Amino acid sequence: MNLGKNIRFLRKSSAMTQEELSERLGVKRTMISAYEDGRSEPKLPSLQKVASIFNVSLDDLIERDLETQGKRTFQSAETRILTVTLDKKEEETIPMISQKASAGYLNGYSDPEYMEQLPQFNLPNLPRNASYRGFEISGDSMLPILPGTVIIGSFIDDFQNVKSGKTYVLVTGTEGIVYKRLFNYLEEKGTLLLVSDNEQYKPYEIAPEDVLEIWEAKAFISTEFPHPKDKKEKVTLEDLSEMISDLKSEIIRQR
């Protein structure tokens, strides 16, 4: 295992001190020293943060000698383990992640004890062959979906299955929890493009190594009805095609 050696190499390559890395991981500086010397190993949430900070996959971080071999391009075969919650009938429930709980979810999403403490609920008519989360969104970047709306997302275990033009909730190491329209450029560029429905917000790219989870939007719950001024025409295939064409042109101009 090359974990400790890789953490030291990545940290030094980024001109980062042990103190700076410890602050970003929320641990003591002595723990960073222990990680790098092989005297201790980070828990999964910390491992994922390290991978996100240095833009490297978990597999490469743990197994590959990054100093001599470098990191590989994105591979879709990475296994993603999902923690689920069950009710008294042993049926999966839908954990609710409010805006206030979003920061804690970044650290606790893989911790069964943390997940059990979140509010749980069920919804009818959802297919039973999937796992779901409810995420309360903030901001106006996806109008007419209003702030405070709860997006019900279905877990995506393989990022290659992201469908361009569909909306998703992403749990990320740097941006937190965001709800966006995605365009899948993993094969072409090794990135995902995040687009807001509110045109005042510019699209941006994100590396898959920075993404902890992706949830495809399946439904939403809101206590407010959209205001008529926020009403938009239904997005057609022609609209999506034009949007993709414009985005490709923008990407080409930025190269």
Image: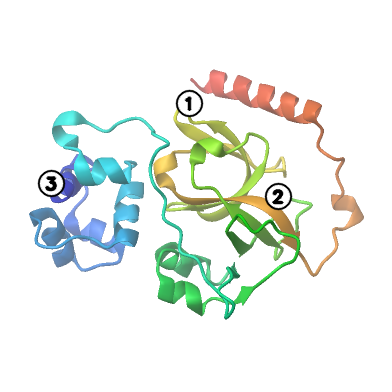
Amino acid beneath label 2: Met
- Residue 5 numbered mark, or none: 3
Instruction: Please name the residue that numbered disc 2 is placed on.
Output: 142
Between 14 and 81, which is closer to the camera in this rendering? 81
Mark 1 surroundings: few (<14), some (14-19) or many (≥20) residues within 10 A: few
Nearer to us: label 3 or label 1? 1
Foreground residue among 81 and 115: 81
Label count reads: 3
Which residue shows up at 75% across the image and 61% down it? 125
Give the secondary structure at mark 2. loop
When asked about the image quadrant of residue 9, the answer is top left
Observer-nearest of 56 and 14 = 56
The amino acid at mark 1 is: Glu
Residue 157 image position (x, y, % from top left): 49, 47
Q: Position of residue 13 (x, y in %)?
A: 20, 40
Q: Which amino acid does label 3 sit on?
A: Lys
